[in-house]
Amino acid sequence: MRCSACPQPAIVDAPYRGGHLCEAHLRASVEERFRREMHRQLPRFGRGTVAVALSGGKDSSVALALAHRYFARRPTVRLVAVSVDEGIDGYRAATLAAAARLTDSLGVEHTIVRSEQALRTTTDRVARELGGVPPCSFCGVFRRQMLNRAAREAGADAVVLGFNLDDLAQTVLMNLVHGDLDRLVRMAPHRRRQPGLVPRIAPLAAVPEREVYLYARCAGLPFDHGECPHAARAQRNLFRTIVWELEEAQPGTRQALLRTHERLVERWLAAEDGGAPGRCRGCGEPSSGELCRSCEFLRLARPPVPPEVPA
Ligand code: SF4
Ligand SMILES: [Zn+2]
Ligand SMILES: [Zn+2]
């Protein structure tokens, strides 16, 4: 199989765009798609701070390397990497070590937020306390909140997430299947600022997971291949299979799911009065309910201690 743009052997088949790409053209194409999405999702941004959520896996490592490249000629933009240590034995230490290798090699400032300190608990511990609840449901909520707080404290104007085309298509489908329109319109990439919430953007939105992986390999980026021990219980696994089968049968399904999301958000923004989220009465973070979802999970795992009754 030859590259559709040159005589070199192709390393990836991209039926959704009707062609194949060699290593050099894959790299150029991923860089171009990232650049275009940055322009679209963070327009006219020439001064300020951008935080990159860095787990040490392939997606966020590519997002950081490409953001570093993108802002290289803009000294007025400060780039910081933020990692979250959720407290997952046998997994997170290796990904954080890979994250540190990458930030060292790029010379990017790196902050690690630890759940043990920020929430006084860990994903492993809450998973034991809430045995029947799939760990990803609270782990994702905790991580988003810690990331938002760290980005806000770093003075960030936006947070870059490593979500690729497959991740986003799966999330759109999950929210549609659950009938969760609120979560669907609130998912990244964000179009507007809300008090206390640093907008999250996803500049790898046009790049399929496989191409992100190949880019990381071809660019020689350090990243960890490990899988979280809780991942087998993730609901997302089912949606990964469904989206993959749909894409095989009908190339372009993932892009169509993302377009559906964009159109819904446009209509929602046009119809909404821009109502800002309130504050959680437990922790003060932005929340659409009285308690944020993080506090709800923490209270389930660790109910408030009743006051002592004097003897
Ligand atoms: S797979 Fe689930 S539990 Fe593991 S780090 Fe990701 S969200 Fe957390
Ligand atoms: Zn080529
Ligand atoms: Zn809260």
Image (cartoon, rainbow, N blue to C red):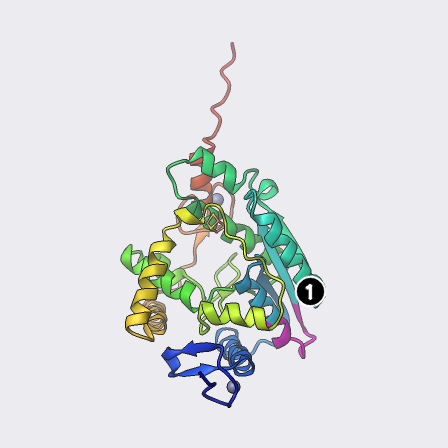
Position in image of residue 240 (x %, y %): 36, 60
Q: Is residue 75 a member of the stretch shown in magenta?
A: yes
**Foreground residue, 240 or 132?**
240
**Residue 72 vertical placement versus 146 (above, below):** below
Q: Quadrant of residue 45?
A: bottom right
**Residue 119 vertical placement versus 191 (above, below):** above
Position in image of residue 281 (x %, y %): 47, 42
Q: Is residue 52 a member of the stretch shown in magenta?
A: no
Question: What residue is shown at x 41% (from left), y 66% (from top)?
Answer: 166
Outermost bottom residue: 6
Quadrant in which the N terminus is drawn: bottom left
Whether residue 267 is visible: no
Specify the segment rendered in magenta. Answer: 66-78
Q: Residues within 10 Å of mark 1 (few under 14, many from 20)?
A: some
Question: What residue is shown at x 69% (from left), y 64% (from top)?
Answer: 108
Question: What residue is shown at x 49% (from left), y 68% (from top)?
Answer: 202
Give the SS element for disc 1. loop
85 on left or right of 199: right
73 on left or right of 257: right
Position in image of residue 68 (x %, y %): 64, 71
Position in image of residue 99 (x %, y %): 63, 58
Provide the residue designation for mark 1.
108
Residue type marked 1: Val
Disc 1 under 8 Å from ligand 1? The reply is no
Outermost top residue: 311
**Foreground residue, 241 or 61?**
241
**Foreground residue, 266 or 277?**
266
**Foreground residue, 41 or 259?**
259
